[in-house]
Image (cartoon, helix red, strand yellow):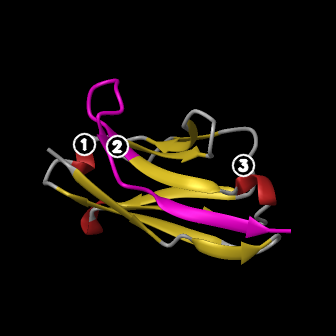
């Protein structure tokens, strides 16, 4: 079992930056692929970025490629999402998730990101 807690959201102007953190409990954090998802009212939750258990491989949605950076620190049981050059369309609730076996099984409660124009 893994428990995930996100932090770092807030209100920022367009062009600004935020760094989200996802703190995980559980000794098996280092063996799970991890991801960040975004959800806006009336829309389904969609994946923004993901990182393999080793940190050796990452993937980004086209909408954030070149602006967002996902990383993890297994020693701290923490995953990060560095968000730069933020746009109003990046607004949403951001969730971190853990994938132990080809499914996103564990979720945090989310942190709100609001980008003003």
Classify the position of the N terminus by image quarter: top left
Does the residue at mark 1 contact the one at mark 3 (Cβ under 8 Å)?
Answer: no
In the rendered structure, the answer to whether residue 19 lies left or right of residue 53 reads: right
Q: Which residue is mark 3?
A: 64
Classify the position of the C terminus by image quarter: bottom right
The crowd level at tag 2 (other Cα within 10 Å; few <14, some 14-19, many 20+) is: many
Q: Is residue 76 above or below residue 36?
A: below
Extent of the magenta region: 97-117
- The residue sitting at 54% across, 37% down in the picture is 45
**Where residue 26 sits: x, y (%)?**
14, 54
Does the residue at mark 2 contact the one at mark 3 (Cβ under 8 Å)?
Answer: no
Q: Earlier in the sequence, mark 1 or mark 3?
A: 1
Does the residue at mark 2 contact the one at mark 1 (Cβ under 8 Å)?
Answer: yes
Residue 83 visible in the snapshot: no
Q: Nearest the camera: 22 or 91?
A: 91
Kindly state the secondary structure of the residue where label 3 is placed: loop
- The residue sitting at 62% across, 46% down in the picture is 40
- The residue sitting at 72% across, 48% down in the picture is 64
Find out whether residue 100 is within the magenta segment.
yes
Kindly state the secondary structure of the residue where label 1 is placed: helix
Residue 69 visible in the snapshot: yes
Disc sitting over residue 53 in the figure: 2
The crowd level at tag 1 (other Cα within 10 Å; few <14, some 14-19, many 20+) is: some
In the rendered structure, the answer to whether residue 27 lies left or right of residue 109 reads: left
**Where residue 53 sits: x, y (%)?**
34, 43
Q: Calculate the distance from the C-alpha at mark 2 to the C-alpha at mark 1.
A: 5 Å
In the rendered structure, the answer to whether residue 12 lies left or right of residue 24 reads: right
Q: Which residue is mark 1?
A: 31
- The residue sitting at 76% across, 64% down in the picture is 86
**Where residue 112 sits: x, y (%)?**
54, 63
């Amino acid at each position: 079992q893994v428990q995930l807690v996100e932090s770092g959201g807030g209100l920022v102007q367009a062009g600004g930056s935020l760094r989200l953190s996802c703190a995980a409990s559980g000794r098996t954090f280092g063996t799970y692929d991890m991801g960040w998802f975004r959800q806006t009212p009336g829309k389904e939750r969609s994946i923004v970025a993901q990182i393999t258990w080793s940190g050796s491989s990452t993937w980004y949605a086209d909408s954030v490629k070149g602006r967002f950076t996902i990383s993890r620190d297994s020693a701290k049981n923490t995953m990060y999402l560095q968000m730069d050059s933020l746009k109003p369309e990046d607004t949403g609730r951001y969730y971190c998730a853990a994938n132990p076996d080809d499914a996103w099984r564990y979720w945090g409660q989310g942190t709100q990101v609001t980008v003003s124009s």
